[in-house]
Image (cartoon, rainbow, N blue to C red):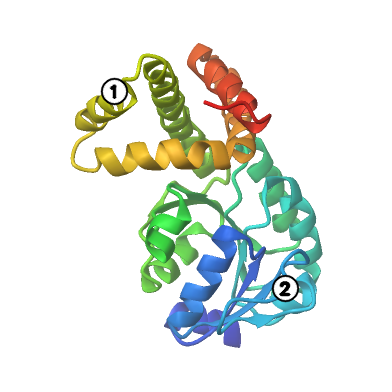
Amino acid sequence: MSTILGAIEGGTRMRVAVLGLGEAGSIYAADLAGRGVEVTGTDPAVPAAPPGVLRAAGIAAAVGGAGVVLSLVGGRAAEAALAEALPAMERDAIFADLNTAGPQDKRRLAERAGRDGIAFADVAVLAPVPRARLATPVLASGSGAERLLPILAGWGVPAESAGPEAGVAAGLKLLRSVFMKGLAATVLEAVTAARAVGAEDWITAQIASELGESGPALVARILEGTPVHAVRREAEMTDARAFLETLGASHPMTDGTIQWLHALAAGSPY
């Protein structure tokens, strides 16, 4: 048994590589380092790594010797990051793709990793990472999912299996997004209309009361976060619509959500 595989299965100290040190990547890297995990990170757009994280010069340097590679580079860069990482990875390491993408994209990445003999995990992050940080719930599917789940559990990550097929976790996340982003669009539409008659606070309180104890915080996050992240969320919902089309499902609500997000991304006030 190799040193890395033994570390993974035995729970001993191992290195983790984080590709992409944006908002989510930097949080994962920092929190893992804070738990005593040896973390290397890389991101050409970020000049410094979080405290406790060793900044690598590039992807190949980051993944060398790592038992788990976490990719948080964004959907558009995911394939290029995987291609650069594979030649430098240990054969018994796990490549975990946490980027939001369609099921077909995740399956393509899994096939690419499989040709190099690397276990691949399609990991769907099910809530904004800044809210719960390392405790953000995830779904995992793919050839590397079953090996990854106990590792995630050891880090305090609430993780569930979605089976051995890459793309399943991604598809379930997109179905969730149909509801969550659709809810956000509905909230924005109602609040915008209420503002015109001076009833913004009243309608906000009405909406929050229907969403349970966490309603006020959820509505606040929707109103604050949706305009800020509109570009990324529009791309996510476009992937969701494409997935719905493969299922033969109608998507008028998703179409409306995409229109809202597109307008917000273009700078239109809500």
Q: In the rendered image, which residue does mark 2 sit on?
A: 89
Is residue 250 visible in the rendered image? The answer is no
Question: Mark 1 or 2, which is nearer the eye?
Answer: 1
Q: What number is the disc on residue 203?
A: 1
Q: Which of marks 1 and 2 is nearer the N terminus?
A: 2
Residue 104 found in image quarter = top right
Residue 83 found in image quarter = bottom right
Q: Where is residue 124 in the image (x, y as percent from the top left)?
A: 50, 48
Q: Residues within 10 Å of mark 2 (few under 14, many from 20)?
A: many
Q: Quadrant of the N terminus?
A: bottom right
Vertical placement of 166 versus 250: above or below?
Answer: below
Residue 89 found in image quarter = bottom right
Image point (65%, 43%), residue name:
107
Do the CB atoms of the residues marked 1 and 2 lie less than 8 Å apart? no
> Dot 1 lies on which element?
helix
Q: How far apart are marks 1 and 2 (CA)?
A: 53 Å
Vertical placement of 130 versus 200: above or below?
Answer: below
Is residue 165 visible in the rendered image? The answer is yes
For the residue pair 161 and 28, the one nearer the viewer reads as 28
Amino acid at pointer 1: Ile
Q: For the view shown, which residue lies furthest in the front direction?
A: 198
Image point (40%, 68%), residue name:
150
Q: How crowded is mark 1: few (under 14 residues within 10 Å), some or many (20 or more)?
A: some
Vertical placement of 28 versus 162: above or below?
Answer: below
Across the whole image, how many numbered discs are drawn on residues? 2
Q: Where is residue 256 in the image (x, y as percent from the top left)?
A: 54, 16
Q: Where is residue 74 in the image (x, y as percent from the top left)?
A: 67, 50
Amino acid at pointer 2: Met
> Dot 2 lies on which element?
loop
For the residue pair 56 and 82, the one nearer the viewer reads as 56
For the residue pair 97 and 261, the one nearer the viewer reads as 261
